[in-house]
Amino acid sequence: MRLDQIVNQPVIEAERFTLRPVRRSDSGLLNMHASDSRVATQTRSLPHPLPPGATDAFVERSMSETRTEDVWVIDGSISGGSEVMGTMSLTPMDRSQAEIAYWVAPAFWNSGLASEAVRSMIAANPHDDSAFFASVFQDFPASALVLTIAVLDYFGDADSFSVALNANVPTWTYILKLS
């Protein structure tokens, strides 16, 4: 019997879901959602089509003690929902800052789930950060609304490379300073 390793990041409780570390059993649902072009084309790092083994590699990286970002699954099972509704990640930056990234499966779009997840992550502040950054593609204004609802402020425009689109894409960057 092989057990999942214990990942040193907290479980974050919200009203409708739990933000919890990734586990190997998430692979199937992560693969299904991440394979959706609507999800991949709104992220910087998801390729489309998703190559074989990419999801398993993501799960292993997310569980690694040497990971460079902490990844949480948005797990709705506490309220009768899906075990994998999307993901949230925090990537540490210098000066006690972190970048928030997220994606939500299309079945849960326009439900307030993403805004609640961002607010929950900020409230928990698991890295004890003094500021949070996030950027979204300008052609997906619903994602910008998520951040403004979660009380991040517009910071500026930039470009980010999208693996799925194989192109630089205009982005809006948002910030929340806590101290």
Image (cartoon, rainbow, N blue to C red):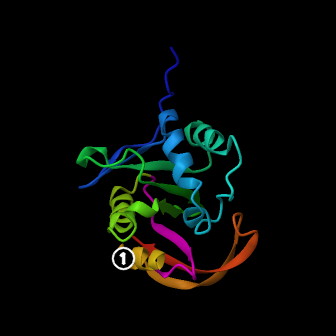
Tell me if residue 25 comes above or below residue 36 in the rendering: above
Assess whether residue 136 is covered by the magenta stretch.
Answer: yes
Secondary structure under the numbered disc 1 in the rendered image: loop
Image position, residue 55 (x, y; %): 61, 44
Residue at the spot x=62%, y=49% of the render? 68
Image position, residue 158 (x, y; %): 65, 82
Residue at the spot x=53%, y=78% of the render? 140
Disc 1 designates what residue? 151
Image position, residue 120 (x, y; %): 33, 59
Give the quarter of the image for residue 121. Answer: bottom left
Q: Residue furthest right?
A: 166
**Crowding at mark 1 (Cα within 10 Å: few <14, some 14-19, many 20+):** some
Residue range (magenta): 127-141
Assess whether residue 170 is covered by the magenta stretch.
Answer: no
Q: Residue furthest top?
A: 1
Of 154 and 167, nearer the camera is 167
Quadrant placement of the C terminus: bottom left
Q: Is residue 119 left or right of residue 49?
A: left
Q: Is residue 91 left or right of residue 116?
A: right
Residue at the spot x=26%, y=55% of the render? 16
Of 176 and 147, nearer the camera is 147
Query: What type is the residue that disc 1 sits on?
Result: Val
Image position, residue 96 (x, y; %): 52, 61
Give the quarter of the image for residue 125. Answer: bottom left
Q: Is residue 127 left or right of residue 77?
A: right
Tell me if residue 42 comes above or below residue 104 in the rendering: below
Residue at the spot x=57%, y=59% of the render? 36
